[in-house]
Image (cartoon, rainbow, N blue to C red):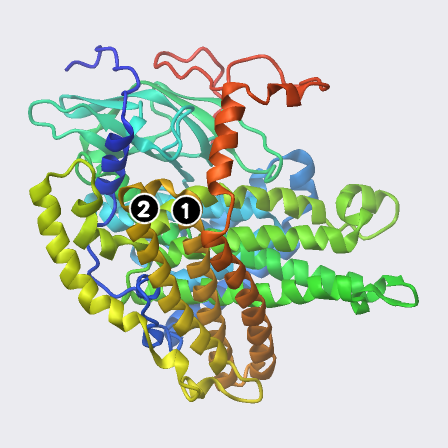
Amino acid sequence: MSASTTPSSRPAVTEREAREVAEAAREQHWRKPSFAKELFLGRFRLDLIHPHPLPADEAAQRGEEFLAKLRDFVETKVDAALIERDARIPDEVIDGLKELGAFGMKIDTKYGGLGLTQVYYNKALSLAGSACPAIGVLLSAHQSIGVPQPLKLFGTQEQKERFLPRCARTDISAFLLTEPDVGSDPARLATTAVPDGDDYVLDGVKLWTTNGVVADLLVVMARVPKSEGHKGGITAFVVETNSPGVTVENRNAFMGLRGIENGVTRFHQVRVPAANRVGEEGQGLKIALTTLNTGRLSLPASCVAAGKWCLKIAREWSAAREQWGKPVAHHEAVGSKISFIAATTFALEAVTDLASQMADEDRNDIRIEGALAKLYASEMAWTMADELVQIRGGRGFETAESLRARGERGVPAEQLLRDLRINRIFEGSTEIMHLLIAREAVDAHLSVAGDLIDPEKSLGDKARAGANAGVFYAKWLPKLVAGPGRLPTSYGEFKHEVDLSGHLRYVERTARKLARSTFYGMSRWQGRMESKQGFLGRIVDIGAELFAMSASCVRAELLRGRGDHGREAYQLADVFCRQSRIRIEELFNRLWTNTDDLDRKVVKGVLSGTYEWLERGIVDPSGEGPWIADATPGPSRKENVHRPIR
């Protein structure tokens, strides 16, 4: 097919075809143990996370030295209020970060990077993001999902030598997957990469390209048509942004993270050398998902920073502000919010550090742990920020600039709320994360009983699946009846002045209950299970709470053993676990007592116009225009707003 051939229109994809594409992209096998996977199967493998893994001394020293330099830089060179006001990170700040090596934190030293571990990379993102969240996003989008990480995992030696030194010091990278009409359903990807000699020719439009406005290098996902000599499929490419035919058509603006350089990028007849293809044709989605296994951990890192700042402001403000003769912190209604912020911040740091260290050690498969960390941290951080705004009252709703203008401390609480909101959408929305994690959590069931609940399988296939399932469940179900969680002496090493052993026994018992509930759901709904998104979401949320409880207890014991605020850590872990147990019991109740069926009926009515009368009495201030912008391939008709920083 020649380069002049008009790209095909967006592929028509059935629901089953979309699932098959997603299934083909996921890692099919479990070659290493997974704490979270075992948890969903009712097996509490504390031995996989305790004693808490730790970084090597040399890695820790290198990481601490960089954190000291980064702290000095963000304290003296970053004006967060200016970035918020101008909606742009100054070029000199970005240049300073380059000189510091911050763009090469995860890149190996042999390519000019700093070679930091995941643990210290996340600590650096927390530190930078606390100074200005937009800076944290800039660094994370470049290294967590941009060019460095896919090349580290899938690139050739020649690609690493060509691109990684640039990414470590001079070039900014971005990751381009989403399209105006394609989000979490990549089977409908419309951007094409047509083979033409030793090149591929790219055509299409990409949306929400974080860093895309200033990027020098792009990782682009495009569909290669199947043809003679070409397997085809969604494929990853490294693209130079200054290539002819690449146009950044718009710099997008958002309710929060106003300093990020996020845009719309159009490709028209862009020639990309075959040497720039990452991996094989058709491996693009697998590369994206594998990259995100650890890439998602950057979001929990930013959430940890948010929690720490919420705690600091809540402590200082609630001690200074008096109501009815005493500081507001001493009023129970406010004090309970402060306790929630403190305990949850401890838990989020425990989850993030544990998952990061597990990623560094590479002894475990952390695809579920990383996804749980992202899901849980993004939801809990948003709640903490909302509680901080409530604690601050009217001042929480007021902007920092307005507070300063009238003589008070400029506390950007409302900005934090706006900045954090996207984390529940970035890199997989909460709803998509529920489905992704649920799919991995029930993998063992589907591997033995998948054909049994597949309506398109033959009776013979179902018979064989039934026999296999019978063998599996005959061995598995009896193990869910009893375990160490019923023995009062279990996990005694966690019993000190504050006793955490009871919480770990609860985790063990509840993991078995969770596994039984999953089995009951599969037995009840069989092939319809995948449509029960409310049920699956609650199953995943229970697992997330159990993971956070486990991580909190293990971290508390680590700190106690090191003599590092161990008593206080035990207190925080205890409070968090008690709060978590209340949430877990509510989620279990909602597994079977909910309005899911009624909700579906109401939704049908809403979409059919049955309740349209309820919308009367308002005016709609929305502007005119289509719901989704036209993304027809072709030459750009807009000014190129690409702004490389040199």
Q: Label 1: how many residues lie within 10 Å, few (<14), some (14-19) or many (20+)?
A: many
Q: Quadrant of residue 485?
A: bottom left
Q: Can you see residue 397?
A: yes
Quadrant of the image containing the N terminus = top left
Q: Quadrant of residue 255?
A: top right
Front in this rendered view, residue 285 or 529: 529
> Distance of mark 1 from mark 2, alpha carbons?
21 Å
Label 2 residue SS: helix
Q: Which residue is mark 2?
A: 525
Looking at the picture, which amino acid does disc 2 mark?
Trp
Q: Quadrant of residue 274?
A: top left
Query: Extreme right residue here?
Result: 325
Residue 127 placed where, x, y %?
Answer: 56, 58
Looking at the picture, which amino acid does disc 1 mark?
Met
Mark number, residue 433: 1
> Is residue 370 left or right of 277 when viewed as pictured?
right
Front in this rendered view, residue 171 or 401: 401
Relative height, residue 574 to residue 13 (above, below): below
Residue 435 placed where, x, y %?
Answer: 37, 45
Residue 131 placed where, x, y %?
Answer: 62, 53
Residue 377 placed where, x, y %?
Answer: 51, 55
Q: Are marks 1 and 2 in contact (CB under 8 Å)?
A: no
Q: Residue at x 20, y 30 (%)?
A: 233
